Image: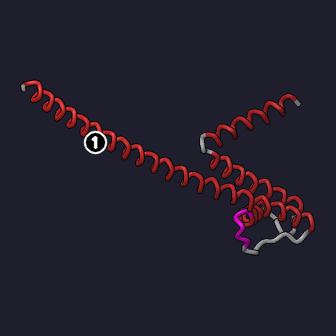
Amino acid sequence: MARKRTLESRLERSVQRAVARRRIFPYLAAATLVLALVSAFVMTLVDKKDFPNFGIAVWWAIVTLATVGYGDVVPTTVPGRVVGSLVILLGVTFLAFLTATVTSLFVSSDREAAKEREQADREQRDEELRQLLHRLDERLAAIESRLDKR
């Protein structure tokens, strides 16, 4: 029991670090792959008639998870349809998370680029103001020098 908690806490910390570093995509992709392989294995157990070998089951799982649904291989038993329903729901969920993750990466990348452009513009304006102040200071010094000579 303690070992399970340790594994869960390690996994949770790993996922939290991945989310914080915006590196969740590999985890979601791996989870999707594991889901495909596990669901394919389960289908070979619960629906041997429609899924006589692991290769056909993997094909079905990938097609189902990707929400393509060619229909060339389908479960016809009740347990097979239950597993299929779960795979469909999880597939849609994982695809939504993958899409959201990729979109988030694009948005944050654009945001960072805009922030960098804004910083460069600000630095350029600051430099122009420094140069203007320097020229004004030189003019003021020249004026003061002329006034002192009188």
Tell me what residue is drawn at x 45 percent, y 50 percent. Answer: 114
Residue 40 vs 8, above or below: the answer is below
* Residue 109 in the image, given as x and y percentages of width and height: 51, 50
Tell me what residue is drawn at x 82 percent, y 66 percent. Answer: 51
Residue type of the residue flagged with mark 1 = Glu
Towards the viewer: 129 or 71:
129
Tell me what residue is drawn at x 83 percent, y 60 percent. Answer: 86
* Extreme residue in the front direction: 150
Residue 143 is one of the magenta-drawn residues: no
Residue 2 vs 107, above or below: the answer is above
* Residue 89 in the image, given as x and y percentages of width and height: 80, 62
Towards the viewer: 139 or 116:
139
Towards the viewer: 57 or 71:
71
Q: Main secondary structure of the magenta part?
A: loop
* Residue 12 in the image, given as x and y percentages of width and height: 74, 37
Residue bounds of the magenta highlight: 65-69
